[in-house]
Image (tube, helix red, strand yellow):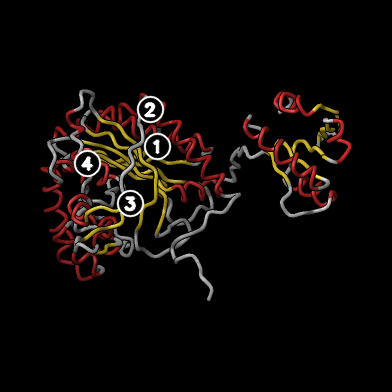
Amino acid sequence: MSFKVPRGTQDILPGESEKWQKIEGIMRHLCHVYRYPELRTPMFESTELFQRGVGDSTDIVQKEMYTFEDRGGRSLTLRPEGTASISRSYVEHKMYGYADQPVKVSYLGPMFRYERSQKGRYRQFVQFGVEAIGSKDPAVDAEVIELAMRVYQEAGLKHLKLVINSLGDKEVRDAHRDALIAHFEPHIGEFCADCQKRLQQNPLRILDCKVDAANPLIEQAPQLTNYLNEESAAYFDQVKKYLDALGIDYVVDPNLVRGLDYYNHTAFEIMSTAEGFGAITTLCGGGRYNGLVEEIGGPESPGIGFGMSIERLLLALEAEEVALNIENDLDLFIVAMDEDAKLKAVELTSSFRVKGIATEIDYAGRKMKAQMKAADRLNAKYVIVLGGSELEEQAANVKNMETGDQEKVPFHDLVNYLLAHK
């Protein structure tokens, strides 16, 4: 019987995993600079958390969640996104009582959604995100957007487009909701079954429908920005001013709504404009979610954040033909001629590794010529050959594989020599 990786998942093999580590390193460095320390939450939570936090009308809750019942009869769900879990942790640990607000955190880990698997979209995917909870300052919105942009720029992407919109406050969304229902209701039979359900649940989601995206009624729909009250419009203007001050280019798209129920005020997406990237251009999405913390039992604590897929970031790098600078050099390969030499090689290898010198030896019992070929395939900078004479003299020739030069070095001085020539 043969086994294969489950559909919608992938093995990330050596050679690829180094790229992931490089990207994750960029993310962690920027989170340190921007002061977003990591918060780690469980990979499964109470199902009700996502129903209340993400929203019953979303595709995630209705179609995509991996939900199961444990032995105690409790309904649990593998996390489909990060914000609800972070908000739950914020409430549970009473972070709203911290002296310094907003509480800024980051997360990085696997998420799970049962959706049609395709290139760059998996049922288990790795998401990086940040959340800033406890402030309604529009400057925080600009900071979060800048951080997301910096991740892509630091990774080497150049073909980026930032799209922003305001979803307004509850008063604005209620007025816009009524206008959307009046607009779509006479023709709702032309739309897919999901949109017909959304008409009363959350008509804003019709604007985000992939099935009916070409329907002219979507293009003609009342724009939310036309319903912004004075407070919401002023807030959005401040966000744009801060983005202008940061030198961040953006496009205002009145039809940008985002797919989760908890968003309000600022919403944004970062897209790839690289040729050949694919039909789905979104790399990252986020926005403000004032009211989410209250929805799950906490006090009034406005927040903003984003989530981005590492898989799609790597696809964008591939589309732009950006090569990541991966540091995976092998400093030294030790060739052992016999068992006595192998014993010494094992001893030396350990002493070198303790000092941070990347070292490898042969474990396949190969002859000297085959070991030298292995050293060459692994791009070893230096090679040491150990045999009877080297053991007797307590010294070995260190060969520079690039120049072919060799230098005899006593065993007791090998560490210092290799550190000096790394």
Q: Name the residue under label 1.
A: 148
- Point out the frontmost of discs 3 and 4: 3
Residues under numbered marks 3 and 1 in contact, where contact means CB atoms less than 8 Å apart = no
Tell me how far mark 3 sits from mark 1, CA to CA.
23 Å
* Amino acid type of the residue tagged 1 in the rendering: Ala
Q: What is the three-letter code of the residue carrying label 3?
A: Met
- Using residue 192 as the reference point, say whether residue 369 is left or right of it: right
- Residue type for callout 2: Tyr
Query: Amino acid type of disc 4?
Result: Tyr
Residue 34's disc number: 2
Q: What element carries label 4?
A: loop
Task: Choose the circle earlier in sequence order: 3 or 2.
Answer: 2
Residue under label 4, please give it. Answer: 289
Q: What element carries label 1?
A: helix
> What's the CA distance linking mark 2 and mark 4?
20 Å
For disc 3, the marked residue is 43
Vertical relation: 360 (above or below) 55: above
Residue 327 horizontal side relative to residue 69, left or right: right
Counting from the top left corner in percent of width and height, residue 270 is at: 39, 43
| In this view, 64 is above or below 421 | below
